[in-house]
Structure formats: structure tokens, C-alpha cells
Amino acid sequence: MMEMLAFGLVAGVAVGGAIGVVAARNVFVSALWLVLSFIGVAGIYAILGADFLAATQVLIYVGAISVLILFAVMLTHHVMGDERSNNRQAFLAFIVSSSVVAALGVLAYRTDWPIRPADAGGSVVTAMRGDPAGSSAASAAAQTGASTALTSTVDLALNQDSNVVRLGQALMTEHLLSFEIISLVLLVALIGAIVIARD
Amino acid sequence: MEASIPLWWYLLVAAALFGTGLFGALSRRNAVGVLMGIELMLNGANINAVAFWRYIAVPSGAGLNGMDGQVFAIMVIALAAAEAAVGLALIISIYRNRQSVLVEDFSTMRG
């Protein structure tokens, strides 16, 4: 019951902030609503048990992206008098987006999701514990005494169901390629942003 | 404990965020507002990924960690950061050249 109340609170903050984003006439005000919506999404992550992701959401979205958007709004400031903030297709866009929401909601409600049984909450942990070193061939090759001590420490942390340890292992073993690619994408975007913005 | 909130509540909230972002991206005249709508849509997709990670049974095998949903969400967050940086740089550059941030003024390449 308590967590339903908490879920209602954070979901209300997230959705209310989102509605504020699209309803505010001033872009600066809607950027501030966007911050509120991001905080609500971070609360949803926290309720879902993804603590690291909640912290990342606060750091990157609330901390970085919102400040970036606010700076862009201030740098491109022009007098928004009584001109309209929405374009002519706003009514059509409203129809389309509300029908998308309705379709997705009906689909989410009516689909018979294969829900994980409640007692198997640690199933991913036990599956992982069977092969503590993961599929990393490198760590298997360098199986010294220090690395076995490290593995047992990690195994202990896995028993405590630590999200961050499991996430770090997943990023460094089975998702290593996408991790490297995303870092390359970030680097290219950084350089591209600098080159585009200063001419 | 966590099963007391049904999965479709999360999916409904995610759909609401996605739809609101879609409306913002389609209807805003200010290019920064369009970008904000896109950020909202990405957040809705992220909530879906994490909710499915939490609720849906994953096939567990050797070496599989079962953290795919969260890894996916992190990738989306990184891509959103890159997209916001490049998009805002583009908007600032266009504003410098054309003194406008309204989307309907960006029509130089229209045939």
C-alpha cells in the first residue's frame, strides 16, 4: 500500500512535469518543468530497484542535460511576445499522440506478460553465481591468487544483491562492445558539438 | 513485495510520458521545445526497459548477467546526452546565422 502511494506520487510528478513541459508557453518555464519530470522518472527507477540508474538519471538528466537546455534557451533568447508557442498542426498532433497513448495503454493492460514469480527475485543472482568470472576469457587466463580473491569478493557482493556490481560486470563482460561503441559515440558527439557551435 | 504494483502501471506511465513528448515534438514551434519533447520520449522508453528488466523472467545461462534492461537504459541515457549536445549546438549555430529558433524558419533545404 505504501509503495503504491509512493508510485502514485513519483508517477504524478513525472507525468505532471511532462504535461507542464508541453503546456507552458515560455520555453524557459517548460525547461524547468522538464527538470521536475526527470526527477519523477528517477523516483520511478528507485521504486523499480534500479538505484544506480536513479542516481545516473539525477546526475545526467537533472544535472547536465537540463543545464544544457537552459543555456541553449538563454543563448537563443528572443522576444516571445504574444506569438503562438505551438504550430498549426497542434490539434492533429494532440489527436495522434493521445491515440498512441490509448493504444499503448490498452496493449499494456491486455497483454499477458510472462511475469517473473515473486520468489525468484534473486534468480539472476543465482544464475550468475554459477559462473562468477563470467564469460570473460581474459580473467580466466589471468587466474592468479589475487584475481581469485577479487572474484570471491565480487561473489560476496553478488550475494548481497548489489545492483552496481552486477551492472559493472555486465558492462565489462557481455555488453563490452556496446560499451566501447557508446563511448566512441560520446566522443564523436562531443567533438561534433564543439565544431558546430563555434564557427 | 515488488509484485504489488502491476507491471502495466509502469507501462502506462511510460506511455503517458512518450505521448506527451510526442505531442511536444510534433507541435512546438521552438526547436528547443522539440528537443525537450524528444528527451521526454526517450525517458518513457527507458522506464519501459527498466520495468521489463524488473518484472519479466529472463532466460538465464552461463555468463548471462540478467542486467540487460539496465544496460539498455544506460545506453539510451548516453545517447540522449550526445543527442542533446549535438542538437543544441546545431540550434545555437542556426540561431547565429538566421536569428531564429522557430522550426518553420529552417526551410533553406526545402526543394
Image (spheres, grey):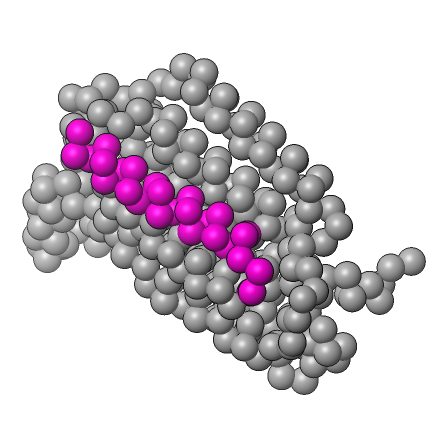
Question: Residue A149: percent from the left, percent from the top?
Answer: 8, 52
Residue B77 falls left or right of residue A74 = left
Q: Nearer the viewer, residue B45 or A103?
A: A103
Dividing the picture into quadrants, the one containing residue A135 is top left
Dividing the picture into quadrants, the one containing residue B33 is bottom right
Q: Nearer the viewer, residue A144 or A42?
A: A42
Q: Residue at x 23, y 19 (%)?
A: A117
Main SS, magenta residues: helix
Residue A113 falls left or right of residue B97 = left
Q: Nearer the viewer, residue A122 or B5?
A: B5
- Location of the N terminus of chain A by quadrant is top left
Q: Nearer the viewer, residue A116 or A126?
A: A116
Determine if residue A6 is in view: yes
Image: magenta residue range: A1-27
Question: Residue B2: percent from the left, percent from the top?
Answer: 21, 30
How many marks on residues? 0
Rendered position, B52 above or below A78: above
Q: Residue at x 82, y 63 (%)?
A: B107
Q: Residue at x 10, y 39 (%)?
A: A159
Q: Is residue A110 magenta?
A: no
- Location of the C terminus of chain A by quadrant is bottom right
